[in-house]
Image (cartoon, rainbow, N blue to C red):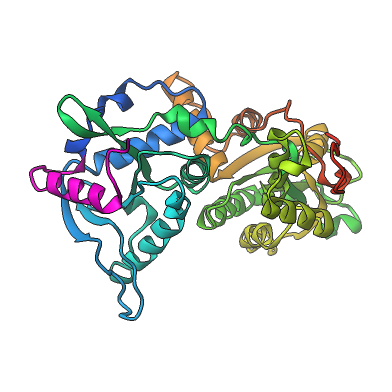
Amino acid sequence: MPLFKNEAEMQKWICDELREADGLADLISNCDYLDDFSPNGIEQENILRSFRSCLSALYITEQISEDENISLDRPDSLKPDLIMYSAESQGMVIVELKNLSGPSREAGTELGAYACELRSYIPFLSDGDLFNVIISPVWPTLLRHYVFNEIFWQQKNLICLTPVETNDGITLEIVNIDSILEANSSENISGQHIAGYQLCLYDHSLYGENPDKERLDKHVTQMQAALSVMSVEGNRQNGHGFAFLWKDHWELSLAPYSISIFNMAPFQSIERFLHDIESLDELTDMQTRFIKLVQEQDPSGHGDSLSKITNSGKRFLSGFCNPAMEGFHTWDVLRDIMLNRAELIAFQGWGLFGDLFNERLISEYASGNLDLSVTSPELGLDVVSELIDPNYEFINLSYLDMGEDEGDEWEHS
């Protein structure tokens, strides 16, 4: 039997309890769970970091609204269950209540809409100043997928709580981190999920007499600046990728330097739906549509997002060389080209790749490796290798027969 008959009853319980509490954290009975949890892998680390960040914002809170319309435009209606101010974090807390498994799929859409509307009042409110709380007695797969995506890929602050019955009455508990991961066993990254190209830095003076292949050496600092700006643009897009600056030792090359630039290719990850099914009949109609879209349109990942990242850096390069994009392919292919002829010079990552690089850099410094560069390409290679699963069985949708016969098979590349 459910603890609450409906969300209204759950909301009344929480609001009644909050009147006697300093903050929402006072209603949580297992706050020490996060102190005792030892993460095993970057997924657990990110979820733990998100949960801790949100929990720290819940100790002293002031209620701003309760199931009230917060829209500035009166004809519209946006009614978050609870909006609170976090005194210690100086941020806003959005609480979304779910009491049934069916409507829980709407939680993500609602939290996003409430965050946008809050920025109508507080325009410079960053994602770091927003703390999202979902309270639900049930956590269906779809909702857990949403939570994982918001935390791991979108890098949002979000914590999951569930009401439980105890000897002292109803309390809230932090949801087990592993239960969030169980719904995302296919979120591993393949080298073919990452698209990129080689930005060749051509020196056309090499066509003339007395060519000097060392002429561009004095511009390495500008090249590194280009990488830094690309990283800023990648983070601005909330994307995930990386770039390597390298010197080309191929004697026939007219591009003494190159920058290999990579970004997650979002449509390539659609093949993950096929890893957990036995037959194509198990696919939903929408999953089938997206698979057919990839088959028909072949979106490789070399789209506008990657172009904007590249163009942001080209402004630092065009004054002394002629940058040209070549070799549109995946990480697996471009990595081998780069490593077979390159002297690696610098690395920059953004999103997930940048976060892990920074964590690894901190660990290296803590262990005494104080001479390690903040753009170490060797450490960058280690980070990329850690995030990409070499044993991932990528399913090439180009070879997938979407016919209606039962038992259709697909090829693993």
In the image, 173 versus 348, the foreground residue is 173
- Which residue is pictured at 50% across the width and 46% down the height? 146
Q: How far from the left and from the top, in percent, is residue 330?
A: 77, 44
| In magenta stretch: residue 11 | yes
| In magenta stretch: residue 192 | no
In the image, 3 versus 206, the foreground residue is 3
Tell me where the magenta segment starts and ends, as one range.
1-24
Q: How far from the left and from the top, in percent, is residue 144?
A: 48, 40
Note whether residue 259 is visible. Answer: no
In this picture, residue 298 sits left or right of residue 348: right
Q: How far from the left and from the top, in percent, is residue 361?
A: 49, 30
- Which residue is pictured at 73% across the width and 25% down the height? 391
- Which residue is pictured at 45% across the width and 53% down the height? 108
Note whether residue 399 is visible. Answer: yes
Which picture quadrant has residue 126? bottom left
- Which residue is pictured at 73% across the width and 56% down the height? 289
In the image, 377 versus 171, the foreground residue is 171
In this picture, residue 143 sits left or right of residue 202: left
Which picture quadrant has residue 32? top left
For residue 249, above or below residue 29:
below
Quadrant in the picture for the N terminus: top left
Q: How far from the left and from the top, in percent, is residue 234?
A: 57, 53
Which residue sits furthest left?
Answer: 20
Which residue sits furthest front?
Answer: 1
For residue 62, above or below residue 362:
below
